[in-house]
Amino acid sequence: MLALTACAVGPNYHKPPVEIPNDFKEGVEWRRAEANPSAALSSTWWRSYQDDTLNELIEDSLKANQSIVAAEAAYRLARATVDANVANLYPTVAAGFSASRSGYGAGAISTGTDIAGTKIVGNEFVADLSLSWELDLWGQIRREIESAKAAAEASDAQLAGERLSIASSVALDYFALRQADIDTDLLKQQQDIDERIFAMTQAEFAQGTASNDDVLVAQDNLEIVIADLQSTEISREQDEHAIAVLVGKPPEVFSLPPRPDYVFTQPSIPSGVPSELLERRYDVVSAERTAASANAKIGAAEAAFYPSLTLSAEGGFEHDAISRLFSVPNRFWTLGPTLAETLFDGGARSAAVREARANYDEQVANYRQAVLSAFQSTEDSLSSVTHLTVQEMRFAGIYKNNRQLLASEDAQVRAGTASEQSLLTQKLTLLQAEQSLKDTQAALTESSVTLVKNLGGGWQWDSSRNAPAGAIVAPAARPDASSTGGSSQ
């Protein structure tokens, strides 16, 4: 029997094969321009944006966000499930003590008793110790441990994913808010100029040098800017509300002062190679570990076809006087094995095995889909960053040219060869060019955040966790864990 405990029925797990490209398709030229493309992505990636306010917001969110609190509780639950399954490998020992006093009337005395027709009152004291141990002959308990451990590792990856999701959401909302700050300032400048142009056009109309159509066009331009300003302010307020909730505060007690002079930073983000995504993407790791958990469930279901062996023992003392309870003549004991086998269950065990195999096939498909989605989202981000980088360069050139045009127009106004209205129109064009440039820089910064998220955010799966079935491995510490609220990931 002891030799059988080294066996475990069911298939051993092997990571499902997936097709992995040698390199990413998009962003090749962008990655070649990186100073150190083989560098690792930092787990505190948000610090590369060099913004103390952003750093504080993200670190506050990692401590206070309720989604992270819930994910941490789910991970602790998964680890407790592992410990509960490990406990099933060991015997259960129980101790007990009971005391009772009972009496019997004359009519309750059976025939042949020594004292008939009298009332009998007696005491009973029992102290016992029992042991029960179900041997894991076919590996059912060890498969359950293997399954629970893989599920805990999946929960661990999900916790890391929740932290990354919250951090990236804070960064995206923060940069969108700063973009709104810049747009609000530029739109207000455009509004001032449009108001001046509108007033000048009205004066020209009164003098007969401008038509009513010119007045309507100037008025429409002013109204468009005012309408755009309202949309920008709505976005800014909603971004601020979103950040408040992410850091665990009600919106009414949270505010960020405007920064119209904000400068967006474009950090260097090493992308690595596609195969690394299988270890860096929390959703891929979680899906793979879920498949491993489902595989172990197959063995646990198959073990139900085999008999179970339980060793039990009980011993103690029993007497009617507690003072003489613990003496050799008052002892009792039982010892023996129990072998049990289900002879008929209407096909329940066969159905359980089919269910476990179907669940495994489903989780393998989910894992492969997660890998494909990881490649897609990363390629999308690389494409976005690449094209936005080119777009930023073009808008920077347009902005530079319009500055030169404004200087030329200003010189013509001073020379008396151009009107003030033409100068104001050129100022409007310059402000619009600046807004296009700033919006592109904001979009590029936000795309870099999305790229960081799609690359796994600096989180790395520790392959040493893939220990043999039944072994319990503590979560490995992530680099810079202290800076993210003591995270185990």
Image (tube, rainbow, N blue to C red):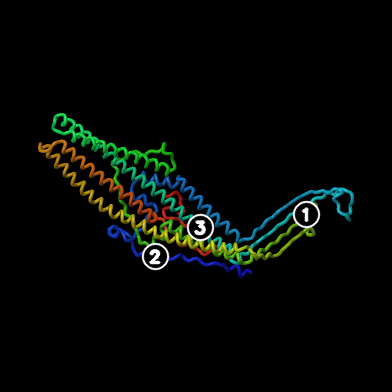
Q: Residues under labels 1 and 3: Cα distance?
A: 50 Å
Q: Quadrant of residue 218?
A: top left
Please state, as top left, top right, bottom left or bottom right, where the C terminus lies in the image: bottom left
Front in this rendered view, residue 447 or 2: 447
Residue 225 sits above or below residue 125 on the image:
above
Q: First in sequence, mark 1 or 3: give its number.
A: 3
The quadrant where residue 184 appears: top left
| Marks 1 and 2, how far apart at CA | 72 Å
> Label 3, on which residue?
151
Task: Name the residue: 16% across, 38% down.
Answer: 423
| Residue 142 seen in the figure | no
Categorize mark 1 by other alpha carbons within 10 Å: few (<14), some (14-19), many (20+).
some
Q: Is residue 28 above or below residue 410?
A: below
Q: Residue at x 53, y 55 (%)?
A: 79
- The mark closer to the camera, 3 or 2, is 2
Pointer 3 or 2: first along the chain: 2
What's under tag 3, amino acid-wise?
Answer: Ala
The residue located at (77%, 52%) in the rendering is 125
Q: Residues within 10 Å of mark 3 (few under 14, many from 20)?
A: many
Q: Which residue is mark 2?
A: 19
Q: CA distance from mark 3 to mark 2?
A: 24 Å
**First of labels 1, 2 by sequence position:** 2
Residue 325's tag is 1
Helix, strand or loop at mark 3: helix
Residue 5 marker? none
Contact? badges 1 and 2 (CB < 8 Å): no
Decide which of 235, 355 is in the foreground and name it. Answer: 355
Horizontal and vertical percent position of residue 408: 14, 42
Amino acid at dot 1? Leu
Residue mark closest to the camera, 1 vs 2:
2
Q: Nearer the viewer, mark 1 or mark 3?
A: 3
